[in-house]
Structures are given as structure tokens and as C-alpha cells.
Image (cartoon, rainbow, N blue to C red):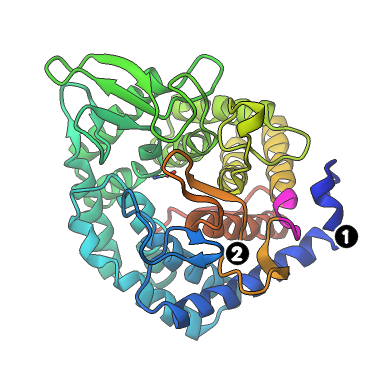
Amino acid sequence: MNTIPGAKLETNSQTLAARVDRLFDFSAGQVERLIANHPGLFPIYTQNGRWAHKGEGWTEWCGGFLAGMAWLIANRTGSADWRNRAIALSSQLEPRKLDRDVHDLGFIFLNSYRPWYQTTGDPAPGEVLITAGRTLALRFNERGRFLRSFLAPESLFIDIMMNVPIIFLAARASGDQSLFEIASAHCRTTERTLIREDGSTAHEGIFDLATGRFLRQSTQQGVAAESTWSRGLAWSLYGFCQVYAFTQDRADLEVSWRNADCFLRRLGADRIPPWDFDAPAGARHDDSSAGAIAASGLFELARATAAIDQARATRYEAAATELLSALLCDHYIAWNTPAWEGVLKHGIYHFHKRLGVDESVMWGDFFVLEAAAKLLQAQASPRSWPAQSHARD
Ligand code: GLY
């Protein structure tokens, strides 16, 4: 087990393996409670620890994370009940495959229908994935060569890097090369416009719709256009790494490496990211969800890197383990907070809109569990585990 400095880790007296077991048990109980207490709800964030029903959503992007947690638990336990629950939750998302209002179809379907397809081999969820990928590709702006965000036609978000893999998946499964070209073009435009020299990321890019020319970096959820919103950096790290699995293009892997190195350079000794790495000292709040995404992404990146650069892969796996370990303590996991309905505390959804600030957020719960599952896989089969098997994509 890694030892990491930091007062918040004083509660980490159990071994990491024991805390991972406890996380799975606790998450299963919280998901059961969510389904029982809030039937039909796919929540985004909590308010005072209770899943919000009426809070503003900004955009509807989180359905796949609840289903994804059920799949992670089903695959860990081998339980038929959990598999049925995962299928039931995933099925409710199917109408979203035609949703043209959001850029989030990867978030929704890659964590629900993809494990369904991979686990069962049933062709029906595979068809849903292809349709969702085709729908997302309709957001492509030919002049600017990017997939536009939900917000405006001239807007590109870094978050879309976590969604573009569903277009690659649809391209591979359907043999439609035009989908591959759209997805590749989006990645190159994102690299050129949102990834900075030092590996940091801007949240948003703004384009001239008449010419397709890139105009400027901007932000919606970060401190400023030139700052580094930590969750955006984590989305890019993980997103480019997933893309590399489809393209085998070294350019995609190297963006992920640059993002990872920047993220790790900017983390403090406690290994918990602030919501924006450039937040002024007085406005510093943790975003535990960014730490969970980065941990899961780094496990993935270690696997992708192993065949090319062993030393780098070892460094990323150690960092992922450290990040996960820092989160698995009483301060961040709600296992000792009665009546708290989420799993991972101290996340942030939208700081400026005051949505889900210092609360549980649905993706934080999902990614901390996913990172824990990857740690177990890495320990069981060092460096050869298929973190996200593409065998059935
Ligand atoms: N919509 C993605 C995020 O808030 O990070």
C-alpha cells in the first residue's frame, strides 16, 4: 500500500484492499437505497446529502452512471439480481439514443449499454450503441471540424472527449468510415485548440461559424478562460486514452500523457484536486470527482502505456493507486455519514451556478467505484488486464 502524506488520510488505517471491499459493499447499499427511495430518478447531484429531484440540471447527462454502478457491482459479485437491475436501469436510457440536444451520449451509453453488450454478447445493446454514436456524430461542424457542445453551435467543450469514443465504437461496429473520420477530426481540433503547451486544458473553445476559424479559449465551469478546471483536465486525460484504444494513433496517447503529467504536477501532497487548479486560495474547494476520474483514467493509461514505456506505465499506476487511496477514507466516502445518500462526498458540479457544491455527484460515485474495480483487476493480473475490453466493440 502507498503511504501518502496529508491529514485527511489519518482515517486510512485499513489496508487499501479492505477499503476497496468496503467501498463495493457500501456502494451496493447506496444504489439499492437510491432505487428504492427515488424510483425512476437518475440523479445528478445531492443537496445536503440527499439526491436532488428539483434542482436545475443544466444539461441531462448522468443516466449512464447509475446504470454503470449497477454493472460494476454485478460484474464484481456475479449476482444475477444485480445484472437484472443493471439491465433494467440501462433499458430506461434507450430513448436517449436519438437525443440531439446533448453532447453526452458517451457518458450515457458507454457506461450502461457497453457493459451490457460486453457482459452478455446480446446484439441488441450493440445496435443501441451504434445508433447513439451516429446521433452524436450529427453534432459535427464541417467548417470548424468539431462536435459542438449542447450550449451553442460555436462552442466546443473538453468534456466531449469522454463522449467521442462512442463514435469510434459505432464506426468500428458498423464499418462506417465517415464516423471514424468525424471522430478523428474532433480529436485533432480539440488537441489544437483546447490542449495547452504544458498539458493543461481549457474548458471551452469558441469558433467563427462563418469560416470555421478558432477564435478563443473560454470556460463555463472553470475560474477563467485561461485557468485549468480540474475535471476538464481529467476528462481529457481519460478521453484521449480511450480514443487511443480505437485509433492506435500515438498522437492521442501523447495528449493523454501530457494531460496526466500536468494533472499530477499540479496536485498537492494530499492528492485531492481543487475544483480549478487556478482557483485563488480563498476560493479553493475540493472536487473529489475530478480525483476519481483521474484515478480511473490513470489506471487505463498505465495499461495503454505498458507496451511502449514500462517506467511511465508504472508511474501512472502508482499515481492512480495514490489518488484512489486518498479518496477511500472517512472524509470522502460517506460510509460513516448516516442519512447521506451518495457515496463520494466533497464533489462539485457547477461552482458558478451553485449546483452540487461540496456534495455527492453521480459521476463521482461511478468513477471512484470504477477506479476501485480497475485496481482489483490490475492486482489480479498486472498490466495485462483489459481495463475496458474492446473485444465486443
Ligand atoms: N458535463 C460534464 C461536467 O460537468 O463535467
Q: Is residue 259 visible?
A: yes
Residue 58 is inside the magenta segment: no
The residue drawn where x is 49% and y is 84% is 80
Residue 287 pos. (x, y %):
59, 44
- Tell me the quadrant of the picture where the C terminus can be found: bottom left
The residue drawn where x is 21% and y is 41% is 137
In the figure, residue 371 lies in which quadrant? bottom right
Alpha-carbon span between mark 2 and mark 1 = 19 Å
Residue 200 pos. (x, y %):
53, 23
The residue drawn where x is 38% and y is 67% is 53
**Which residue range is magenta in the image?**
325-331
Foreground: 193 or 354? 354
Residue 329 is inside the magenta segment: yes
Instruction: Give, as a three-letter code, the residue at label 1.
Output: Ser
Rendered image: mark on residue 13: 1
Q: Is residue 12 visible?
A: no
List the single residue furthest toward the left.
210
Query: Mark 2 or mark 1, which has the lower sequence index?
Result: 1
User: Which residue has dot 2 on it?
Assistant: 343
In this rendering, the answer to whether 386 lies above or below 119 is above
